Image: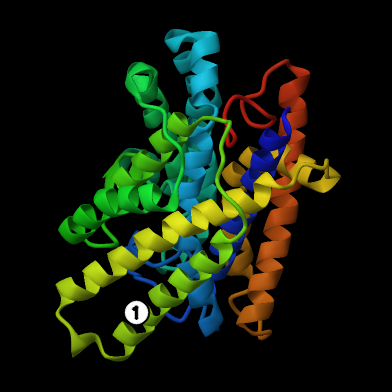
Amino acid sequence: MTQRQAGLDYLRGFVVVLVVLHHAVLAYCRFGYFDTQHYLWSTAPIVDADRWAGFDILVLFNDSFFMPLMFLLSGLFVGPSLRRKGPRAYVLDRLRRLGLPFVLAALVVMPVAYYPSYRMTGSTIGFSAFWVQTIFDGPWPNGPAWFVGVLLVFDVLVAVVQPWLPRWRLSFGGLAALSLVTFLPLLIGFGPVHWFTFGPFAVQASRVLLYAAYFFAGVSVGPAIRPGGRGRIALALALFAVLLAEQVYRSRDPGALPGLVWLVLYGVALALFCAAATLAMLGVFAGLTRPRVVLDRLSRDAYGIYLLHYPFIVWGQYALLEARVGAVSKALMVFAGSLTFSWFAAAGVGALVRCFGKSSVSGRGDSTLA
């Protein structure tokens, strides 16, 4: 593995840790609410009475850039893999590495994760009845597995269009313009919370083109990425301050401007911050060239952690509902426990898979995520 690929692998692991942290604190945000009539319309599977405003800021920070960054990372090594394997073998490999885990996650992992949330509606039915109802009658929650399903669709598409994709060099201006063009129109058209769903497949309506743009940008840039220096950090922090100020001001005086104006301001601020934060993260981790044992192991198991962490998150939050230790303590316990248990589970599954000469769930492959 080249030095730059090592840095990108480390970034993959770091972003997955951010995903686990993001899900761990969602139950304790001030904006959280639970809908007992339609549990999937809640802000999170579990919503606790204990809240902390700092988690609202953390969720806004993560949610504004880390999924586009994951799609970009997933596209970086697509070009070399396609050239080496050819389109047919590449698609078959993606079906094995993404399709099979997605099916297992949709059929097993996510129903297990969402059962406590369903119980919070007051239902007393057992898990078997809940599973049958979920799979055959719906709704069918997909949790974090939505990313894997969308990534599989993008991988199939890129096998067709990759020969016509132009080469591209990342710059803040180019990535910011791409973010604005692909995000703002759909945000205005669908709003920030609407999702397209079909069975276990789902994607946020306002962000589907943004995710596609970042994935295909990664394909166009390729593994020899030059994201720039660490000076991007200051720009990213400044733009996040603007995004945060806009959100705080709107929450305090929502009638100060028309709803469409607020939406446009939010969309512009998020798109600019997303581009700057992506480049800042790439710049920082590109400099990590010296081998690091913990980061090596984390990057090896990152895909498995992503697929397996959600049941640990939700059941941990559910178990702590009555605990009187405060929101911060609860979130820290859920985060530490979920990361630890899902890492052990991912490492165990990965070891079993490697014993059979496969690499569907864990291990380094052609993509920096899967």
Percent coordinates x, y for residue 301 in the rendering: 70, 39
| In the image, residue 314 above or below residue 91 | below
On screen, residue 50 versus residue 274, left or right, reads right
Three-letter amino acid code at the position of disc 1: Glu
Q: Quadrant of residue 325?
A: bottom right
Q: Residue 33: tell me if it is visible.
A: no
Q: Secondary structure at mark 1?
A: helix
Which residue corresponds to the image point at 53% horizontal and 71% vertical from the top-left? Answer: 58
Q: Residue at x 19, y 57 (%)?
A: 190
Question: Residue 352's image quarter?
Answer: top right
For the point 36% across and 78% down, which residue is it? 247
Say above or below: 365 vs 264: above
Mark 1, residue position = 246
Q: Is residue 319 left or right of residue 180?
A: right
Q: Nearer the viewer, residue 55 or 347?
A: 55
> Residue 30 appears at what percent x and percent y?
46, 81
| Quadrant showing the N terminus | top right
Q: Is residue 163 visible?
A: yes
Which of these two is toward me, 126 or 1? Answer: 1
Crowding near the residue tagged with mark 1, few <14, some 14–19, many ≥20 C-alpha atoms within 10 Å: some
